Image (tube, rainbow, N blue to C red):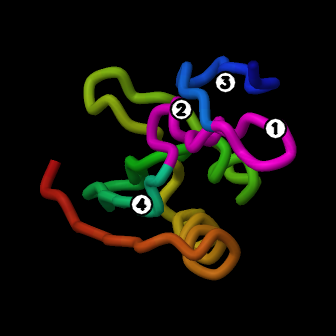
């Protein structure tokens, strides 16, 4: 007879000394883009740039830039003159790997 209880996230039961049960999965493993540390920015021909990557919405809120979701490109649109603020927060604060690409249209 053990005191082990199943973990709700994985259903795994591991008997540990002291009668405690510990699962191996963390909460972040079940979230989409949990390990995503990248950001891809496309600079448009006029005044719009598009951002893609994991947790981009939170990143843009943290950078305090105006945003709108572009359904046609399936990416977050930001003004091109504010992309540098997004890059600073992504690279220096969140330690993301950032790629920037200029697009024709």
Mark 2 or mark 1, earlier in chain? 1
Tag 2 near tag 3, CB within 8 Å: no
Find the distance from the CA under tag 1 to the CA under tag 4: 40 Å
Q: Earlier in the sequence, mark 1 or mark 3?
A: 3
Mark 4 burial class by Cα count in 10 Å: few <14, some 14-19, many 20+: many
- The kind of secondary structure element at disc 1 is loop
- Circle nearer the viewer, 1 or 4: 1
Helix, strand or loop at disc 2?
Answer: loop
Q: Is residue 31 magenta?
A: yes
| Residue at the spot of label 2 | 31
Give above or below for 69 relative to 45: above
Which element is circle 3 on? loop
**Residue projecting furthest to the front:** 1
| Residue linked to disc 4 | 39
Residue 1: image quadrant is top right
Residue 28 in sight in this render = no
* Residue mark closest to the camera, 3 vs 4: 3
């Amino acid at each position: 007879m053990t005191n082990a209880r199943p973990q709700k996230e994985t259903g795994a039961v591991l008997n540990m000394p002291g009668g405690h049960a510990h699962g191996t999965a963390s909460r972040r493993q079940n979230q989409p883009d949990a390990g995503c540390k990248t950001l891809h920015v496309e600079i448009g021909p006029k005044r719009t740039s598009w951002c893609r990557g994991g947790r981009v919405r939170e990143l843009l809120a943290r950078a305090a830039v105006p945003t709108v979701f572009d359904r046609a490109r399936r990416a977050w649109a930001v003004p091109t003159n504010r992309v540098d603020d997004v890059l600073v927060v992504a690279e220096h604060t969140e330690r993301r790997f950032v790629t920037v690409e200029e697009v024709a249209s």
